[in-house]
Image: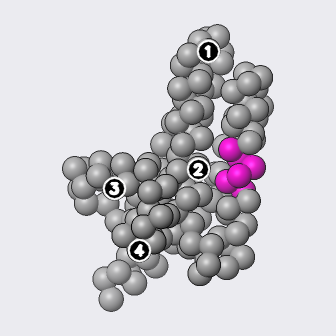
Amino acid sequence: MVSTPASLPNSASRHCGLYQQVHVDSQVHGNATPHQMVVMLFDGLFESLAQARGAIRARDIEAKGRAIGRAVGIVDEGLRSALDLQQGGRLAHGLHELYAYVTARLMHANLKSDEGALDECAALMTPVREAWAAIRPAVDARRDA
């Protein structure tokens, strides 16, 4: 389960920088729900992976580092730090481990300019993003009830 920054204890809320940034951006762009913000984080991740892939191909080390750094921030500060490990059960713990693995693979991709590692990260995160998008009707119905 993902908690909104307002529902996290003060010490944990400090670590939701990207989540909060997306929240502020979404307020400017139409008051996105917390669920929509998570989908936006995933979209930002995939955009960053594509930028990193392009930078590797162009041999642009600086752009690669920026793109992968953004991807790491999205995974760690946006997605992983927003998990509620106490109430989220096995799902939250499984996502926590997945996000840690993806972060490690992103670091490897940065050090070795490894497009295959970027592809692996995209392949691992695609089903999670699709699951978030698929539950939107249920989330909206619950919110509107």
Quadrant of the image containing the C terminus: bottom left
Q: Residue at coordinates 57% horizontally, 33% vertically from top-left?
A: 69
Residue 31, given in percent of the width and then of the height, sits at 25, 60
The magenta segment is: 98-103
- Mark 3: give few (<14), some (14-19) or many (20+) Cα within 10 Å: many
Label 2, label 1: how far apart the Cα atoms are: 22 Å
Image disc number at residue 7: 4
Task: Tell me, for residue 23, which label it has, or none.
Answer: 3
Please indicate, yes or no, whether residue 125 appears anywhere in the rendered image: yes
Which residue is pictured at 59% across the width and 12% down the height? 60
- The amino acid type of the residue labelled 4 equals Ser
Q: Is residue 105 above or below residue 136?
A: above
Q: CA distance from mark 2 to mark 4?
A: 18 Å
Could you tell me how far apart the alpha carbons at marks 4 and 3 are, in whole angstroms?
Answer: 14 Å
Q: Residue furthest front?
A: 11
Tell me which residue sits at (44%, 49%) in the image.
18
Kind of residue sitting beneath label 1? Ile
Q: Nearer the viewer, mark 3 or mark 2?
A: 2
Which amino acid is tagged 2?
Asp
Quadrant for the N terminus in the image: bottom right
Disc 1 and disc 3: Cα gap in Å?
30 Å
Q: Which mark is on residue 61?
A: 1
Q: Mark 3 and mark 2: span between their CA atoms?
A: 16 Å
* Secondary element at tag 4: helix
Measured from the top left, where is residue 42 in percent x and y? 52, 50
The residue that disc 2 covers is 76
Q: Between disc 3 and disc 2, whose residue precedes? A: 3
